[in-house]
Image (tube, helix red, strand yellow):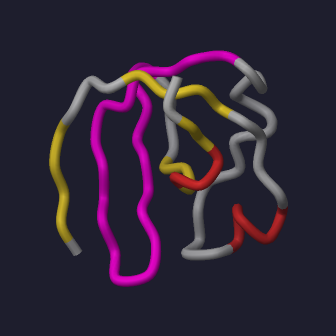
């Protein structure tokens, strides 16, 4: 696993239950708003998936639930 910090901004596009469960991610559906942009504070690269930690928001979220603006 590799970690690094960033302050890149990405848009949350929504997340399916399968995307949340893959890699034991936190559920963003109650804390994030679809279409809204968030700053990525930290990134964890795993062998088969990547997780984002967002600035000022608790949890680690599946990277596939975000897109470049």
Residue 24 figure quarter:
bottom right
The main secondary structure of the magenta stretch is: strand
Residue 16 lies, with reference to residue 32, above or below; the image says below
Locate residue 52 relative to residue 3 in the image: left or right: right
Residue 32 figure quarter:
top right
Label total for image: 0
Locate residue 64 relative to residue 35 in the image: left or right: left
Please state the extent of the stretch shown in magenta in the rendering.
36-56
Residue 51: where, in percent of width, then height? 44, 56
Q: Give the residue at x 23% y 75%.
A: 1
Q: Does the magenta stretch include residue 45?
A: yes
Residue 23: where, in percent of width, then height? 55, 75
Locate residue 67 relative to residue 8 in the image: left or right: right
Residue 22 lies, with reference to residue 5, above or below; the image says below
Residue 45 figure quarter:
bottom left
Q: Give the residue at x 30% y 31%.
A: 41
Q: Residue lying at the far front in this picture: please name it.
A: 69
Q: Nearer the viewer, residue 26 or 40?
A: 40
Q: Nearer the viewer, residue 48 or 25?
A: 48
Q: Give the residue at x 56% y 38%.
A: 67
Q: Nearer the viewer, residue 54 or 59?
A: 54
Residue 42: where, in percent of width, then height? 28, 41
Q: Residue lying at the far bottom in this picture: please name it.
A: 47
Residue 58: where, in percent of width, then height? 50, 35
Locate residue 35 relative to residue 57 in the image: left or right: right
Residue 44 lies, with reference to residue 29, above or below; the image says below
Q: Give the residue at x 16% y 49%.
A: 4
């Amino acid at each position: 696993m590799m970690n690094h910090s960033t302050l890149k901004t990405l848009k949350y596009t929504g997340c399916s239950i399968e995307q949340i469960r893959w890699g034991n991610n936190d559920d963003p559906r109650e804390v994030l708003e679809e279409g809204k942009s968030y700053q990525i504070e930290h990134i964890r690269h795993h062998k088969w998936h990547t997780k984002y930690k967002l600035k000022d928001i608790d949890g680690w979220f599946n990277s596939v639930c975000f897109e470049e603006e």
